[in-house]
Image (cartoon, rainbow, N blue to C red):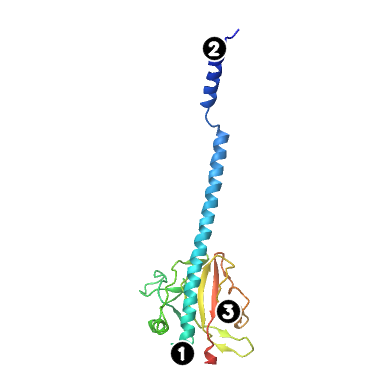
């Protein structure tokens, strides 16, 4: 028969053996999978927060430009340049799309540059804001960025064409984003139209939302 002392030593030995047993392969795989899932969730959440923060910066800058332009037109009853232009506004645009030392904006295959005359004119109404420089992929190998004053299409909301209607153009990261500013320009047969209910001008590829915001009507000045 086993004495109490022997039983005690055997019990302690079994406990030590159990405590020294390592993880099995299955347990290790489960731990790795769980860590991977948590890491992926963290990355997605961070990217979402970063995207929202960048879009807020873009919208804030666009609001300031809208105020400057509207104020300038109200005071001067005109735009600083003739209709038919498309120029970058202010600073903060990319610089690596062509050899021109000026900052670039617009589409990567249709580069636009700033007009110091236009920017300086609007800056008389207040501080000209910079615009987040991050480029947004709007198609395969095709990018859009910056903020510009574009007037290259016809507004025809009521059957009376208005050539080269001025609009504020910028992009937000992600599809189906709310441009916040109104009225939004939408695309119709033969030109563009204005909408007070649309949240954007549509998606540009799988990663960006295009925002074209109508500015004061030069034909009504």
If you read the primary sequence from the N terminus, does the residue marked by circle 3 or circle 1 appear first? Answer: 1
Q: Can residue 71 be seen at all in this image of the molecule?
A: yes
Q: Position of residue 37 (x, y in %)?
A: 56, 47
Q: Nearer the viewer, mark 3 or mark 1?
A: 1
What residue is drawn where x is 57% and y is 35%? 27
Instruction: Name the quadrant containing residue 160.
Output: bottom right
> Gap between marks 2 and 1, in whole Å?
102 Å
Q: Which residue, given by chain and number where applicable, does mark 2 sit on?
A: 5
CA–CA distance in space, label 3 to label 1: 24 Å
Residue 181: give x, y in percent of width and height: 55, 76
Label 2: how many Cα within 10 Å (few below 14, some 14–19, many 20+): few
In the image, residue 210 sits, relative to residue 75, either above or below, namely above
Q: Identify the residue at the far front of this view.
A: 4
The N terminus lies in quadrant: top right
Identify the residue position indicated by label 3 in the image. Answer: 185
The crowd level at tag 3 (other Cα within 10 Å; few <14, some 14-19, many 20+) is: many
Element marked by disc 1: helix
Q: Which mark is residue 198?
A: none
| Circle 2 SS class | helix
Mark 3: secondary structure: strand
Q: Nearer the viewer, residue 8 or 92?
A: 8
Q: Earlier in the sequence, mark 2 or mark 3?
A: 2
* Residue 143 visible in the shown view: no
Residue at mark 1 = 75
State yes or no: discs 2 and 1 in contact (Cβ < 8 Å): no
Residue at left 55%, top 15%? Answer: 8
């Amino acid at each position: 028969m086993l004495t109490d002392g022997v039983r005690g030593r055997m019990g302690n030995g079994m406990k030590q053996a159990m405590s020294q047993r390592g993880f099995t392969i299955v347990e290790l795989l489960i731990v790795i999978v769980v860590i991977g899932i948590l890491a992926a969730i963290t990355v997605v959440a961070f990217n979402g927060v970063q995207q929202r923060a960048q879009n807020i910066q873009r919208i804030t800058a666009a609001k300031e430009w809208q105020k400057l332009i509207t104020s300038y037109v109200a005071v001067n009853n005109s735009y600083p340049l003739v209709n038919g232009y498309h120029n970058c506004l202010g600073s903060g645009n990319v610089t690596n799309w062509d050899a021109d030392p000026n900052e670039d904006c617009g589409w990567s295959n249709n580069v636009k540059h700033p007009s110091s005359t236009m920017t300086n004119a609007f800056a008389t109404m207040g501080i000209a804001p910079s615009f987040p420089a991050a480029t947004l992929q709007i198609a395969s190998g095709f990018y859009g960025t910056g903020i510009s004053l574009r007037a290259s299409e016809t507004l025809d909301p009521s059957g009376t064409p208005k050539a080269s209607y001025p609009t504020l153009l910028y992009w937000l990261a992600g599809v189906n984003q709310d441009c916040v500013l109104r009225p939004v320009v939408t695309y119709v047969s033969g030109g563009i139209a204005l909408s007070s209910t649309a949240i954007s001008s549509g998606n540009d590829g799988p990663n960006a939302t295009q925002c074209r915001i109508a500015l004061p009507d030069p034909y009504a000045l």
